[in-house]
Image (cartoon, rainbow, N blue to C red):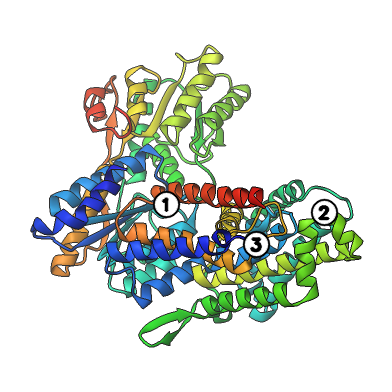
């Protein structure tokens, strides 16, 4: 891989951080940096699942809605049904895993394109969320559901447990993709399904596992979302599919599959978070953050395309 | 881009101007930044901040109902040193924990236009008295009927939203009837949308062709209702009343499409909010409770016994593109 695709995202992150540090003396404080991590943790975790899927040359439009469904199952089970909170969390995770499995099964066994399948399940998950929750926000959650939103101190800085979970998940995924054979096979499927078949990689089983694991990851994102906002919000997650794809692309992963690094996705998510936070601190309206994100996405995809042609 | 440039220039130039409120930062968070109502609100905040020499941070959700973006904005503003945050909550209930954290950090939080649930989650609420807005147009519609038997259609917002409930109930009280009165022949939800308002009115006319009073939740819904009435050739037969006082709505009053509308004042909500925020930052004095930002009945056909102002006044005070 050419160096610009590997280090481009990191350079962009460092440059933007340096710029905002020069503009606001409040930017480069431990508390503010911890805050940025907290703000990207939901989309950041979701983007891990999205990265795995995009590496196989797939895409998942349903992730935000599946997460919203998971969060409503967790909060309603715990508050309205009065279930043990850990059992409620498990139910929410299972709902997300079921949707991931459904996506994977339709894609591998019915051989439908991932874009269409997940467009369908996006709507299904949204509708079920609204019907199940009666579009009502759930509050008054038990402490177990809020754990990942609580903080511990590193020096003067309060850091949430959710942030630590996100970082741990990124490094675990990075390790698994690099060092294990299923991890390498994910790249192989995305690069060339034909070659993967000749190498006797069990493509169907691997693909279905990727979508199912992605479902579990969205379930964890749901738990983080609940912990972060302190409520079950049926309107949540509506733009998170595009936000997670944005993080993946900004991180240098190719939308055509087979190329990219999951740690790049974390950097991509952080770039969006840094701009959102930095521009707010400078007093610049949030719409400019959207404008800049758009420009960065185009830049990232251009870099990917140019480096591809160069090969 | 202008404000971005201004902020960049500010780094070099602002330290030179010594205003009394120097260093005071106030945040404004709206539901979206595309709705003219919120554009006007922001204008009020920008002007008031300039007058007081305070710095304004602004943010908005990506769509109506986008709680996550509002939570993020509150956190960023607290981190950026805001002493006061003004917010129109997208989700009255879901935003409460984030507001609590900000208040625990010593920030005064004022809700504009829409209360939180519970209302006591914020220090204060600066908003239109939506019940009164409904009462005014209810009285007007009753007078406009001049003793004829009423056949009422209500084009409402959506279930469970306080603003819609208050305006609807206010209208009924002003009109002098109770919910489920026999004269209410049709009630439909429109989400305040013109296309949905038109569809709702078309369906209502199918049900009751002789409707002569149309209560609408806002002016886009009223414009939709007028379209439906005109297609049926009944635009002269019904009195349409509404709430908002946006410039497009007031022009429709002038054109005779809407008979009367209750005008509200988003600019005032924001400017009073900024002033209260600066006051708190300077003196520590917390404003508390509900502040009514006023409502005025706008109509070009005044009715005896109902106070109203004409559209010349309405267009002066309206929000949106004049």
Which label lies toward us, 3 or 2? 3
Q: Which mark is residue A2?
A: none
Compare marks 2 and 1 and give the one earlier in the sequence.
2
* Residue bearing mark 3: A260
Q: Position of residue B175 (x, y in %)?
A: 39, 33
Q: Position of residue A109 (x, y in %)?
A: 89, 55
Left or right side of B117 for A269: right
Q: Quick one: quadrant of the N terminus of chain B?
A: top left
What crowding class fits label 1: few (fewer than 14 Cα within 10 Å), some (14-19), or many (20 or more)? Answer: many
Left or right side of B170 for B283: left
What crowding class fits label 2: few (fewer than 14 Cα within 10 Å), some (14-19), or many (20 or more)? Answer: many
Name the secondary structure under disc 1: helix
Q: Chain of mark 3?
A: A
Q: Chain of mark 2?
A: A
Q: Is residue B47 above or below residue A273?
A: above
CA separation in Å, label 2 and label 1: 35 Å
Q: Which mark is residue A107?
A: 2
Left or right side of B176 for A134: right
Specify the farthest residue to the front. A310
Asked whether the beta carbons under mark 1 and mark 3 sit within 8 Å of each other, the answer is no
What crowding class fits label 3: few (fewer than 14 Cα within 10 Å), some (14-19), or many (20 or more)? Answer: many
Name the secondary structure under disc 2: helix
Q: Is residue A233 above or below residue B311?
A: below
Q: Is residue A102 above or below residue B313?
A: below
Q: Which mark is residue A289?
A: 1
Left or right side of B148 for B44: left
CA separation in Å, label 1 and label 3: 25 Å
Which label lies toward us, 1 or 3? 3
């Amino acid at each position: 891989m050419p160096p610009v695709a590997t280090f481009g995202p990191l350079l962009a992150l460092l440059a933007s951080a340096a710029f905002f540090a020069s503009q606001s003396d409040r930017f480069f404080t431990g508390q503010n940096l911890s805050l940025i991590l907290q703000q990207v943790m939901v989309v950041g975790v979701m983007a891990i699942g999205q990265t795995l899927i995009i590496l196989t040359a797939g895409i998942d439009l349903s992730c935000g809605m599946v997460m919203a469904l998971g969060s409503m199952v967790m909060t309603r089970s715990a508050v309205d049904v009065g279930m043990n909170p850990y059992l409620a969390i498990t139910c929410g995770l299972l709902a997300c895993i079921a949707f991931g499995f459904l996506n994977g099964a339709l894609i591998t066994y019915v051989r439908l394109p991932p874009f269409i399948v997940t467009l369908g399940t996006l709507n299904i998950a949204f509708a079920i969320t609204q019907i199940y929750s009666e579009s009502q926000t759930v509050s008054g959650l038990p402490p177990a559901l809020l754990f990942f939103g609580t903080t511990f101190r590193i020096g003067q800085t309060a850091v949430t447990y959710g942030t630590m979970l996100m970082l741990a998940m990124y490094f675990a995924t990075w390790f698994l993709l690099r060092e294990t054979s299923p991890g390498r096979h994910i790249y192989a499927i995305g690069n060339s399904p034909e070659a993967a078949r000749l190498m006797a990689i069990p493509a169907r089983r691997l693909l279905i596992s990727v979508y199912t694991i992605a479902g579990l990851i969205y379930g964890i994102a749901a738990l983080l979302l609940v912990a972060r906002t302190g409520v079950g919000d049926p309107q949540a997650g509506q733009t998170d599919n595009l936000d997670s794809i944005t993080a993946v692309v900004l991180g240098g992963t190719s939308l055509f599959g087979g190329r990219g690094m999951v740690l790049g996705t974390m950097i991509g998510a952080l770039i969006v978070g840094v701009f959102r936070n930095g521009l707010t601190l400078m007093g610049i309206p949030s719409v400019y953050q959207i404008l800049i994100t758009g420009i960065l996405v185009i830049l990232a995809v251009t870099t990917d395309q140019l480096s591809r042609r160069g090969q | 881009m202008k404000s971005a440039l201004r902020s960049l220039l500010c780094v070099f130039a602002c330290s030179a101007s010594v205003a009394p409120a120097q260093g005071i930062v106030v945040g404004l968070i709206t539901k979206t930044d595309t709705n003219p109502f919120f554009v006007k609100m922001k204008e009020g905040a920008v002007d008031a901040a300039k007058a007081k020499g305070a710095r304004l941070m602004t943010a908005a959700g990506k769509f109506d109902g986008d709680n996550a973006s509002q939570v993020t904005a509150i956190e960023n503003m607290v981190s950026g040193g805001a002493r006061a945050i003004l917010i129109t909550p997208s989700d009255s209930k879901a935003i409460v924990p984030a507001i609590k954290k900000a208040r625990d950090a010593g920030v005064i939080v004022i809700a504009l236009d829409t209360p939180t649930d519970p209302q006591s989650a914020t220090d204060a609420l600066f908003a239109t008295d939506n019940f009164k807005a409904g009462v005014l147009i209810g009285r007007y519609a009753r007078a406009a009927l001049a003793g004829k038997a009423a056949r009422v259609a209500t084009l409402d917002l959506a279930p469970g939203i306080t603003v819609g409930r208050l305006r609807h109930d206010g209208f009924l009280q002003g009109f002098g009837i109770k919910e489920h009165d026999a004269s209410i022949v049709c009630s439909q939800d429109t989400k305040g949308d013109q296309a949905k308002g038109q569809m709702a009115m078309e369906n209502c006319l199918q049900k009751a062709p002789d409707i002569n009073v149309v209560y609408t939740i806002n002016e886009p819904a009223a414009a939709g209702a007028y379209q439906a009435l005109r297609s049926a050739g009944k635009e002269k037969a019904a009195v349409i009343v509404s709430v908002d006082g946006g410039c497009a709505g007031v022009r429709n009053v002038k054109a005779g499409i809407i008979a009367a509308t209750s005008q509200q004042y988003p600019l005032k909500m924001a400017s009073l909010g900024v002033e209260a925020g600066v006051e708190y930052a300077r003196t520590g004095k917390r404003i508390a409770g509900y502040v009514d930002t006023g409502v005025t009945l706008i109509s070009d056909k005044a009715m005896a016994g109902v106070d109203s102002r004409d559209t010349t006044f309405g267009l002066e005070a309206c929000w949106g593109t004049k």
